Amino acid sequence: MRFTLLVCLTMTMISCGKDDQYKLRTMIRVIGADGIEFDGALGTPGSTSSVTGVTPKEFKLPATGPISAVIQKSTKDDLREIIVECWYNSSSVTETAKTSVEYGVASVSCS
């Protein structure tokens, strides 16, 4: 009994200390150099939203079907790289797209 309690307590403490990186996520993440402005659309089949933002930015989505995003840089003469990541019920990136051209577009889709 004492050993079982000790094991359960130890396992609880270990799991409480887990970093957020181990959680399963479904999201579109737009990263790159800080401050890159973008516009685009993202969502699931039948439910798409227009988005606007500045890197870095995360958009959480339901894991009920495929998710996708089309993101376009929106600042003239900005040649910095923007990266669009698709995470689907995962603790790591499922698909990545990037662009560094002026008004460049990056699109991803995953399930």
Image (cartoon, grey):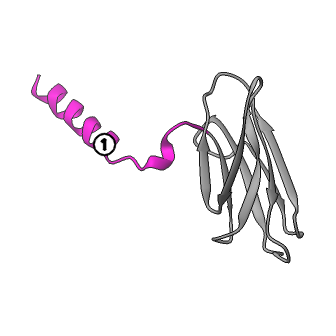
Question: Circle 1 sits on which residue?
Answer: 16
Residue 7: in magenta span: yes
Q: Where is the C terminus found, in terms of image quarters?
A: top right
* Residue drawn 81% across the image and 44% down it: 108
Relative to 57, does residue 103 appear above or below in the rendering? below
Drawn side of residue 51 relative to residue 91, left or right: right
Element assignment for label 1 = helix
Residue 100, quarter of picture: bottom right
Q: Where is the N terminus found, in terms of image quarters?
A: top left
| SS assignment for the magenta stretch, majority | helix
Give percent across and percent down for residue 90.
61, 37
* Residue drawn 18% across the image and 26% down it: 4
Relative to 77, does residue 10 appear above or below in the rendering? above
* Residue drawn 74% across the image and 40% down it: 42
Span colored in magenta? 1-26
Q: Nearer the viewer, residue 23 or 76?
A: 76
